[in-house]
Amino acid sequence: MNSTNRDTCGWLQKKDDDRRDSVEPTPAGLVEIFDDETRDHVDHTAPCAAIESANDWIVRLPSIQRNDLDALSPWQLPEAVLRVSPDLSATKVMQITLALQRKMLCHESEFDGSIFMLGLPGSNAHPGYIHAWTACSMAAVAPQTAQWQRRALMHHSQACVELRKGIRDSADDDASGEWMRATVLMLYLFEKQRSRKFMEAGQSYDTAAIHLKATHRLFDERKGVYRLNTIHGCMLYEAYIARTVDNYLFQPDSALPLDYITRSIDYHEENLGKLGIPVELMTTPWVGLWGRKFTDLVYRLSWLAHQIPLDQTNTERLQAIAAQLSSRELIIGGSAFGIDEATLKYYTDARLAYWHACSFFADAVLTDGLRSPVTIFQQHHVRAGMELMNELTVKDHVNSHLTWPLVILGFGVEDVDELELHKNMVACLGPSGGEEMVEKANQMVQAVFETKKAAHEAVSVAEWIRLIVSFNMYS
């Protein structure tokens, strides 16, 4: 169990029987991706030529206690999933899911009460859901070989097909919507780690961007016709809020208004209340323990940065945020329910790091850009934030939710030693955020650093934001 007395990460699926050995054809463009060293042509419509050995399925996590998987209710994989991976079983899916949960989501090592288990009962009729989950799990824990990459991509491709069918054919109701919302989040989680490889392989469209936008349709535009009437649905919605906030600076969406996250959190808390879940308990590590104030504030700062040049109204909005940041009251957000001392310190320090990053960012935008050297005010927040991040990024709890403040603080580094330290900290987010996120974050901070050093005057906010967007990073 985690710090909220509930295992709170993950999404998932279930059931159906039978096996076949053929693999259904998959759409061109979605599966023609390999690691650079194995970029040979492979026929993805053919059956898997070689099934990896059973040992490849063994998940070795010596630091955690193994769950009694046999104690879980029996379930079977859908036939469509077994066509791609005939050697896959429910137990193996749960093993790799446990590894995914531990490595990428929130470091939890139990299934009891988790979002995975909560989603399992309704997943038997939706193979696309398990296809997406299996692809994510394989990408996170399987050997980085051509065969494993091919298999993960085949599951991803089938999930895309099923999701398109679902969006096209299903009714706008709670049951059909829940599996699609879970699937699109899983697809995004898979694709954000591979967006460059998709493009390098000749794909003319950015699937991560497509599915990030699709989340808005499935989670927001349909709010009028469905309710979050399950804990699983609420957990998915909170994960959606977190993905939207974490990405807006790097992947702006002009269709979203300034108060979008404010309204989304209100809707989320309203549904938690109807389910009898205390709002102060919260239900995921993404939003709950950071506090709703920081979640909303980070989105608003990101949104305002993309409104450059600021008119009087937006300038006043940013000044109001800066005034709010002058107090440390925001750091007291979130819930301390059931949290041990070490975990409480982690989340308190994380909120403090967010506070330093937000304070630096708001001031830099208000003072028309980045300077070298930075002002004394900005230097204080950058250095204090970096010191906290240096401690946070080596903790067991760390995940990619720290990407936003760490990247922001990186824009304030002033010498090559600080830059190297920052790169090392970003690398610590790799297991959760993916190698591509690490690479792009480092390139982005390096580019801003070099631009600052070369400029005789401040780097304008417009140029700064242009550089950020140009790296097409996903968080």
Image: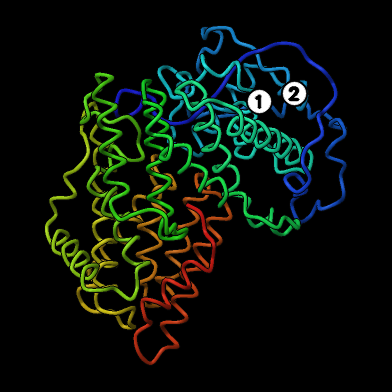
**211 vs 387, nearest the viewer:** 211
**Where is residue 90 drawn, in percent x and y?**
63, 16
**Where is residue 415 drawn, in percent x and y?**
40, 78
Q: Name the image quarter holding residue 143.
A: top right
**337 vs 243, nearest the viewer:** 243
Vertical order, 243 against 382 (above or below): above
Disc 1 to disc 2, C-alpha distance: 7 Å
Q: Which residue is mark 1?
A: 58
Helix, strand or loop for disc 1: loop
Query: Coloring scheme of the render?
Result: rainbow
Residue under the point 21% across and 25% down: 278
**Where is residue 194 drawn, in percent x and y?**
63, 50
Residue under the point 38% across and 44% down: 242
Helix, strand or loop for disc 2: helix
**Tag shown at residue 54:** 2
Q: Residues within 10 Å of mark 1 (few under 14, many from 20)?
A: few
**143 vs 249, nearest the viewer:** 249
Q: Name the image quarter holding residue 264.
A: top left
Residues at circles 1 and 2 in contact by the CB criterion of under 8 Å:
yes
Residue under the point 61% across and 26% down: 130
The quadrant the N terminus occupies is top left
Q: Name the image quarter holding residue 147.
A: top right
Vertical order, 366 against 95 (above or below): below
Q: Is residue 105 left or right of residue 6?
A: right
**Where is residue 49 drawn, in percent x and y?**
88, 32
**Tag shown at residue 193:** none
Q: Amino acid at mark 1?
A: Ile
Q: Amino acid at mark 2?
A: Ala
Q: Residues within 10 Å of mark 2 (few under 14, many from 20)?
A: few
Q: How many marks?
A: 2
